[in-house]
């Protein structure tokens, strides 16, 4: 179950198609959906409660189905240790209908709320206890030890886009780790730590995950400082700095497309602090 909440697609035919797909999934997995719809980014996913489970359907044009994002949740369920707290995957189902392919995932229903509902950006100090931060550090350490060939962040993006968004030459990343790749406040539950949304996990530069979480915390300086303090052993290293810059660059790319406009100047300021170079104008 992902904690992010978006609206239904503007195109009514796409919304109707996804609702039909959810009905097909429920029938195939022998569950009965109930409660409100939860839409994902650009209507690509649709989820609803189904008893003590969460039913989620993801769709893609058939020629683009499969691959890293398609398989991420199922691979995480079998590969990532249970010491990393996340919803258990109970079953899944694949099918193709017309020009679209679908994957339905039936996961454990998590009732612990996300720190922020509907947005990755922190909007207040949630007052998280020390035990929560210890659990988050332990989870990231356990995840870092997972061997995988999945690439969450590619050197090709760094080589192609680093100068465009950060204004500096791209580094050749030498320090890599396994991480979540979308570590933000809508994907973290509290007061009991649960980490949602495992589509994109894999290998990435050291410092990417904590750097991304820090960036999404810049709206609340006290929490941003706590993130830096908790992950100083990673972020305050040359490899960690490079990984944080990759996260900032990708977030600046998203901001340039109109996502999180209020966060953009804070991210730019953080990048300039690290590099000493003004970021290019969007």
Image: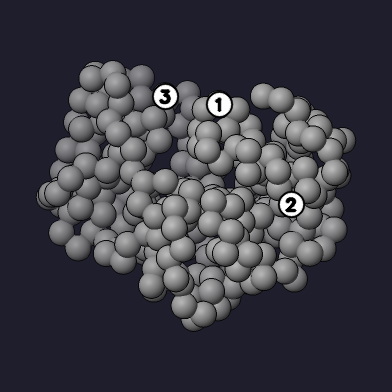
Q: Where is mark 3, residue-wise? A: 61
Image quarter (top left, top right, bottom left or bottom right) of the N terminus: bottom left
Asked if the residue under mark 1 is in contact with the one under mark 2, i.e. CB atoms within 8 Å, the reply is no
Q: Where is mark 2, residue-wise? A: 243
- Whole-number angstrom distance, CA of label 2 to CA of label 3: 32 Å
| The image quarter in which residue 226 lies | bottom right
Q: Position of residue 191 (x, y in %)?
A: 38, 72
Q: Which element carries disc 3, helix, strand or loop?
A: strand
Q: Nearer the viewer, residue 195 or 107?
A: 195
Q: Where is mark 1, residue-wise? A: 257
Residue at the location (71% across, 58% down)? 207
| Mark before the other along the chain sequence, 2 or 1 | 2
Q: Is there any visible trace of residue 62 in the rendered image? A: yes
Asked if residue 122 is positioned above or below residue 78 in the image, the reply reads: above
Q: Nearer the viewer, residue 243 or 223?
A: 223
| The image quarter in which residue 251 lies | top right
Q: Position of residue 134 (x, y in %)?
A: 55, 78
Q: Nearer the viewer, residue 279 or 172?
A: 279
Please state if 207 lies on the left or on the right of 200 as rendered: right
| The image quarter in which residue 57 lies | top left
- Whole-number angstrom distance, CA of label 2 to CA of label 1: 22 Å
Q: Position of residue 16 (x, y in %)?
A: 20, 25
**Number of numbered discs:** 3
| Mark before the other along the chain sequence, 2 or 3 | 3
- Whole-number angstrom distance, CA of label 3 to CA of label 1: 23 Å
Q: Which element carries disc 1, helix, strand or loop?
A: loop
Asked if residue 67 is positioned above or below residue 281 in the image, the reply reads: below
Residue at the location (39% across, 55% down)? 116
- Given this view, does label 3 or label 1 mark the residue nearer the observer? 1
Q: For label 1, count other residues whose C-alpha is less than 10 Å away and answer few (under 14), some (14-19) or many (20+).
A: few
């Amino acid at each position: 179950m992902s904690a992010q909440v978006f609206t239904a697609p503007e195109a009514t035919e796409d919304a109707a198609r996804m609702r039909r797909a959810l009905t097909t999934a429920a029938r195939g997995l022998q569950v009965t959906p109930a409660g409100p719809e939860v839409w994902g980014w650009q209507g690509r996913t649709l989820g609803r409660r189904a008893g003590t489970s969460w039913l989620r359907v993801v769709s893609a044009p058939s020629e683009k189905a499969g691959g890293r994002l398609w398989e991420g949740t199922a691979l995480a369920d079998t590969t990532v240790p249970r010491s990393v707290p996340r919803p258990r995957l109970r079953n899944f189902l694949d099918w193709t209908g017309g020009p679209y392919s679908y994957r339905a995932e039936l996961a454990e229903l998590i009732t612990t709320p996300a720190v922020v509902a509907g947005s990755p950006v922190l909007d207040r100090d949630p007052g998280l206890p020390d035990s929560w931060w210890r659990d988050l550090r332990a989870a990231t350490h356990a995840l870092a030890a997972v061997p995988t060939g999945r690439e969450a962040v590619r050197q090709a993006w760094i080589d192609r886009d680093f100068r465009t968004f950060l204004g500096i030459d791209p580094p050749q990343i030498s320090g890599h780790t396994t991480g979540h790749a979308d570590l933000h406040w809508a994907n973290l539950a509290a007061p009991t730590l649960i980490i949602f949304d495992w589509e994109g996990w894999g290998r990435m530069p050291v410092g990417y995950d904590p750097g991304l979480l820090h960036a999404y915390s810049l709206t609340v300086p006290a929490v941003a400082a706590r993130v830096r303090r908790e992950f100083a052993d990673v972020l305050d290293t040359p490899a960690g700095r490079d990984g944080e810059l990759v996260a900032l660059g990708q977030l600046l790319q998203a901001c340039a497309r109109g996502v999180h406009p209020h966060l953009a100047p804070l991210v730019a300021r953080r990048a300039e602090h690290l590099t000493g170079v003004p970021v290019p104008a969007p």
